[in-house]
Amino acid sequence: MSRIPSGGMVPLSGRIEDDLYQWFISLEYAGAKSNSDKLREALKELRLQHEASADSVKAQAWMLGMTDDLRQALAVIERSEMAHSEVVTTLIDHVIAMAATLISARPGGAAEAAQVEEQLVRRAMALTEALLRQALTPGAAAFAPEVVQRHIGRTLELATLINTNKQGDGNG
């Protein structure tokens, strides 16, 4: 198979089931006016997804792209309603980072699996810490200021038990 110069176009043909075709033509890509445009955009997206499965930085970029609509909608809400949520922003950042690790990790043994575990727990604890900071006041920096207080009860109970056990062991 000969290589096409960079930027050159190659025809692509194939048969697909009608329901898959109907779904495909319903997709919307910015600037894609024809099915050929849509196919190019879909293949770019598929390539990024494939590359993300082996590289956490690319996985994070892919996940950010997947949340573009959400982040744009939040930006509109912030401007139109003068509301901002540190809680949602923090959740997006941490969940994307954890998802990128989950998508791209391919541990070859227990030591590498332990490294993945370390990354995930470190990020989960950073998220927990950030949410606990939001609980320091009755109203979090959130669209619903009471959201953190409403869900923190069990976490505080567990933290109290852990602290009590550590003090009882002489480790606190």
Image (cartoon, rainbow, N blue to C red):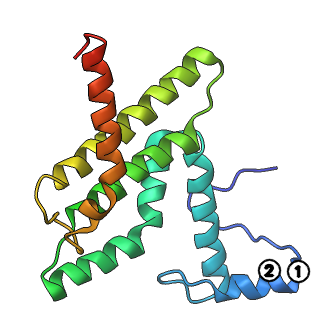
The answer to whether any part of residue 158 appears in the image is yes
Between 166 and 95, the one lying in front of the other is 166
The answer to whether any part of residue 127 appears in the image is no
Residue at point 18% right, 55% down?
134
Q: Quadrant of the C terminus?
A: top left
Q: Is residue 12 left or right of residue 66?
A: right
> For mark 1, what is the residue?
17
Label 2 crowding class (10 Å Cα cut-off): few <14, some 14-19, many 20+? Answer: few
Q: Is residue 130 above or below residue 172?
A: below
Q: Is residue 164 above or below residue 46?
A: above
Q: Are marks 2 and 1 in contact (CB under 8 Å)?
A: yes
Q: Is residue 134 left or right of residue 13?
A: left
| Secondary structure at numbered mark 2 | helix
Q: Looking at the picture, how far across and down is residue 28, in whole percent?
A: 56, 84
Between 78 and 35, the one lying in front of the other is 78
- Tag of residue 110: none
Q: Looking at the picture, which amino acid does disc 2 mark?
A: Leu
Residue at point 47% right, 82% down?
30
Residue 143, image quadrant:
bottom left
| Secondary structure at numbered mark 1 | loop
Label 1 crowding class (10 Å Cα cut-off): few <14, some 14-19, many 20+? Answer: few
**Alpha carbon of mark 2 to alpha carbon of mark 1: how far?**
5 Å
Residue at point 78% right, 70% down?
12
Q: Looking at the picture, how far across and down is residue 22, in whole percent?
A: 76, 88
Between 150 and 99, the one lying in front of the other is 150
> For mark 2, what is the residue?
20
Residue 81, image quadrant:
bottom left
Between 35 and 55, the one lying in front of the other is 55
Q: Looking at the picture, which amino acid does disc 1 mark?
A: Glu
Residue 64, image quadrant:
bottom left
